[in-house]
């Protein structure tokens, strides 16, 4: 399967797709730092900078559209300033929807912050779901946390999967039966939410400290900024403020910097803060590949027939 990546950032979603066996056939990213990273790792992939200037003719034929449209106008980190889908950045969802309507990929994948669910008192999420539904897609959504997929970081995100003309999206995001969950805020033993993700990083001892929390209690700040030594870190901040790194077994005031120039280090943290969690994306993408064979078997029958006739 092939995918077109939008709002690609530094390629977190793209890497997750590739780990699931999906070929990234197109990328779009407007920020310079992200473009530099993408060019280094996907040098030969067709690329566009500005999604507002793209038409369907610019995007190759693919089975999957993947992207997390900008979250700044939706994020709870901007309490009191959220413009929702009316904002210039998060409003780029509508351009994404235009391209979906024009190209009609079998699968659509969207990642965004949990704030998408309650922005405009739920009105923005209603718009997203209604738009995909009117385009003929069955839609499913779920909030997943990266800490249950083997990473020592809390990162809750809303994941939306849509399947053209089928209910396959629901089978992608939800498994039959019950799933184990952690019975406390942090669990070094790691009860995993996702089957197949058995390799955790519970012994990792390098974590981030956000500037707003340095020298304060771990519970400081409305966004839970601060230092934790219970096996995980708070969500990395895309605003670049989480640029202090320390080892948990070192005195609290001792910090080890990355050694990179301040400007570059800030760009790195901002990019990582905006990036998708690769293990979560990989888990979802593998299930998309599996359900694609179930819900769109005619494509695989034709492909096999073509291979046989060529012999």
Image: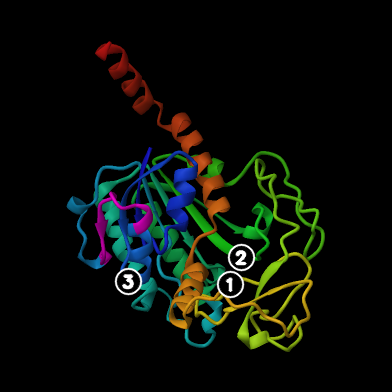
Task: Looking at the picture, tell me which residue is in the foreground, 26 or 169.
Answer: 26
Q: Is residue 261 above or below residue 310?
A: below
Identify residue for label 3: 32
For the residues bearing labels 1 and 2, Cβ distance under 8 angstroms? yes
Q: Decide which of tag 3 and tag 2 comes sooner along the chain.
A: 3
Quadrant of the frame with the N terminus? top left
* Bounds of the magenta segment: 40-51
Q: Residue 254: x, y in percent? A: 71, 82
Point 53% across, 54% down: residue: 278
* Alpha carbon distance from label 3 to label 2: 25 Å
Identify residue for label 2: 155
Point 52% across, 88% down: residue: 80
Identify residue for label 1: 236
Q: Decide which of tag 1 and tag 3 comes sooner along the chain.
A: 3
Q: SS at mark 2?
A: loop
Callout 1 crowding tier (Cα within 10 Å): few <14, some 14–19, many ≥20 = many
Q: Quadrant of residue 226?
A: bottom right
Q: Residue 162: x, y in percent? A: 44, 49
Foreground label between 3 and 2: 3
Q: SS at mark 1?
A: loop
Point 45% across, 71% down: residue: 71
Q: SS at mark 3?
A: helix
- Which residue is situated farthest in the front direction here? 259
Task: Looking at the picture, tell me which residue is in the foreground, 272 or 74.
Answer: 272
Can residue 233 be seen at all in this image of the molecule?
A: no
């Amino acid at each position: 399967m092939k995918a077109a990546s939008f709002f690609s950032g530094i390629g977190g979603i793209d890497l997750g797709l590739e780990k699931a066996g999906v070929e990234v056939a197109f990328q779009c990213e407007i920020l310079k730092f992200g473009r530099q990273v993408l060019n280094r790792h996907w040098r030969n992939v067709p690329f566009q900078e500005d999604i507002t200037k793209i038409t369907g003719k610019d995007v190759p034929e693919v089975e999957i559209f993947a992207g997390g449209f900008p979250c700044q106008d939706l994020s709870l980190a901007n309490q009191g300033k959220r413009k929702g889908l009316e904002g210039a950045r998060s409003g780029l969802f509508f351009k994404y929807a235009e391209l979906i309507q024009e190209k009609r990929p079998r699968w659509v994948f969207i990642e965004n912050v949990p704030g998408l669910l309650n922005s405009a008192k739920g009105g923005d999420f209603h718009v997203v779901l209604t738009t995909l539904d009117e385009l003929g897609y069955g839609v499913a959504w779920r909030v997943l946390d990266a800490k249950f997929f083997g990473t020592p970081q809390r990162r809750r995100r809303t994941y939306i999967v849509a399947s053209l003309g089928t209910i396959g999206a629901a089978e992608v995001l939800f498994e039959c039966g019950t799933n184990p969950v952690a019975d406390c805020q942090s669990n070094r033993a790691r009860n995993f939410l996702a089957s197949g993700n058995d390799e955790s990083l519970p012994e990792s001892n390098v974590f981030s400290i956000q500037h707003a929390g340095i020298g304060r209690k771990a519970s400081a700040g409305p966004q839970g900024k601060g230092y934790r030594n219970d096996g995980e870190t708070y969500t990395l901040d895309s605003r670049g403020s989480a640029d202090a790194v320390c080892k948990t077994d070192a005195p609290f005031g001792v910090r080890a910097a990355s050694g990179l120039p301040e400007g570059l280090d800030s760009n790195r943290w901002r990019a990582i803060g905006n990036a998708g969690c690769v293990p979560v994306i990989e888990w979802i993408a593998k299930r998309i590949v599996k359900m694609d064979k179930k819900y769109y078997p005619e494509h695989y029958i034709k492909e096999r027939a073509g291979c046989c006739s060529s012999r």
